[in-house]
């Protein structure tokens, strides 16, 4: 548990809260809203909170990369402070390894079915928290041991290497790897390494760790700009410039190397990182420059305990718990009852997070 630092960049916590709001309630909310109203606009919004079958991009696809982006974003702040008081590299590696295994363990609890105590359901690598673990450890090492230009070079190498791995290898019994479902080298490697303990879907994880790291590095670059640049308006210009370049390169690359979230293609990294830069620039302008942050208090409450919110929202069925309290409304709300339980479940989760915030209880991994 930790207390709040007085020098925190407000917009980072609020952006993290925004991302967590999308994860823990928005998809269910818009799905149930459309179920109740069934209009073209609600159908559109509901569809935006689902993933495309393979190619393409919807709003929901930004949620996971934004999570990794924010992890990279805070590294310059947390690591520089850590290294100021502790220059022992051995303790740093112990810290990194500890966080890596805790995140993997939480990932096993959330989506690895660890609490089922059924080995046939166990998944080794299949969760956002585990992708964060990989991106965090490699990006932190890069921040500590590499110069700025070397980190940019590493980012480019990650994108190029992964692109080549998705297009050059020959897959036994299939042929040359493509960026299509079930015929890509990343999925072949996952099946080869994890076997029956693999994800069991078209999502890939092992080789995709290369681009998970690239996404986290993109957040690191934004964090360095915010930390090192004293002119806040220049920060905005730089973030928008980074975003425009990344977005443009992602769209251009999409013409020959498609944007695919499920295999975390290099163009997906560029396109999603571009959006993340724009979001960070907007929140930084609104919160840290214009000082318009009172409206976002509820996002700050969520963002300050993001990992807690993520894990317990996946482990505990808050809408079902809300149903135990609100079941009397079912006959009167009919097709809107599911929406009410989703909102009620989020209210219960928020109440818990607010209680933790008011008591200055912040659980960090």
Image (tube, helix red, strand yellow):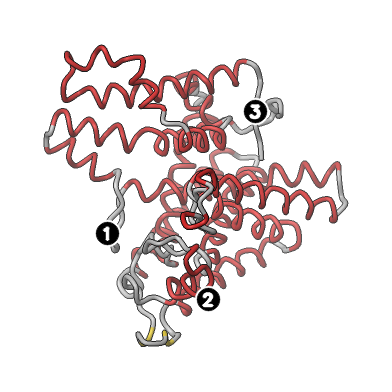
Residue 34 placed where, x, y %? 19, 34
Depth check: 135 or 108 in front?
Answer: 108
Label 3 or label 2, whichever lies nearer to me, is 3
Judged by depth in the image, the label closer to the viewer, 1 or 2, is 1
Q: Position of residue 178 (x, y in %)?
A: 35, 78
Q: Which residue is disc 3 drawn over?
A: 362
Q: Residue furthest left?
A: 39
Do labels 3 and 2 touch, CB within 8 Å?
A: no
Mark closest to the chain's N terminus, 3 or 1? 1
Q: Quadrant of the N terminus?
A: top right
Question: Which numbered tag is attached to residue 53?
Answer: 1
Q: CA distance from mark 3 to mark 2?
A: 38 Å
N-terminal label among 3 and 2: 2
Q: What residue do we see at 14% from left, 29% from top? A: 37
Secondary structure type for disc 3: loop
- To which residue does mark 2 refer? 161
């Amino acid at each position: 548990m930790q207390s709040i630092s007085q020098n925190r960049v407000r917009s980072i916590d609020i952006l993290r809260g925004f991302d967590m709001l999308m994860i823990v309630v928005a998809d269910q909310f818009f799905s149930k809203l459309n179920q109740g109203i069934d209009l073209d606009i609600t159908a559109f919004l509901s569809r935006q909170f689902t993933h495309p079958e393979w190619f393409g991009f919807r709003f929901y696809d930004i949620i996971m990369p934004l999570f990794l982006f924010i992890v990279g974003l805070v590294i310059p702040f947390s690591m520089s402070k850590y290294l100021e008081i502790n220059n022992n590299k051995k303790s740093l590696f112990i810290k990194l390894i500890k966080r890596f295994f805790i995140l993997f363990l939480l990932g096993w609890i959330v989506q690895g079915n660890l609490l089922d105590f059924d080995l046939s359901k166990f998944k080794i690598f299949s969760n956002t928290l585990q992708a964060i673990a990989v991106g965090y450890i490699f990006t932190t090492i890069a921040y500590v041991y590499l110069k700025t230009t070397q980190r940019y070079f590493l980012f480019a190498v990650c994108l190029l290497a992964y692109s080549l791995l998705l297009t050059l290898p020959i897959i036994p019994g299939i042929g040359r790897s493509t960026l299509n479902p079930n015929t890509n080298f990343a999925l072949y490697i996952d099946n080869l390494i994890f076997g029956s303990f693999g994800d069991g879907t078209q999502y890939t994880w092992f080789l995709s760790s290369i681009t998970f790291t690239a996404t986290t590095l993109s957040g690191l670059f934004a964090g360095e700009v915010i930390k090192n640049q004293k002119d806040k308006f220049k920060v905005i210009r730089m973030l928008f410039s980074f975003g425009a370049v990344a977005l443009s390169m992602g769209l251009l690359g999409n013409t020959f190397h498609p944007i695919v979230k499920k295999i975390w293609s290099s163009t997906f990294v560029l396109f999603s990182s571009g959006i993340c830069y724009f979001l960070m620039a907007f929140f930084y302008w609104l919160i840290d420059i214009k000082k318009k942050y009172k409206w976002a208090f509820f996002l700050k409450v969520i963002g300050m305990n993001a990992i807690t919110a993520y894990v317990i929202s996946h482990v505990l069925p808050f809408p079902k718990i809300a149903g135990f309290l609100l079941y009397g409304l079912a006959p009167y709300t009919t097709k809107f009852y599911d929406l009410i339980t989703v909102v009620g479940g989020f209210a219960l989760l928020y109440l818990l997070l607010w209680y933790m915030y008011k008591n200055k209880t912040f659980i960090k991994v």
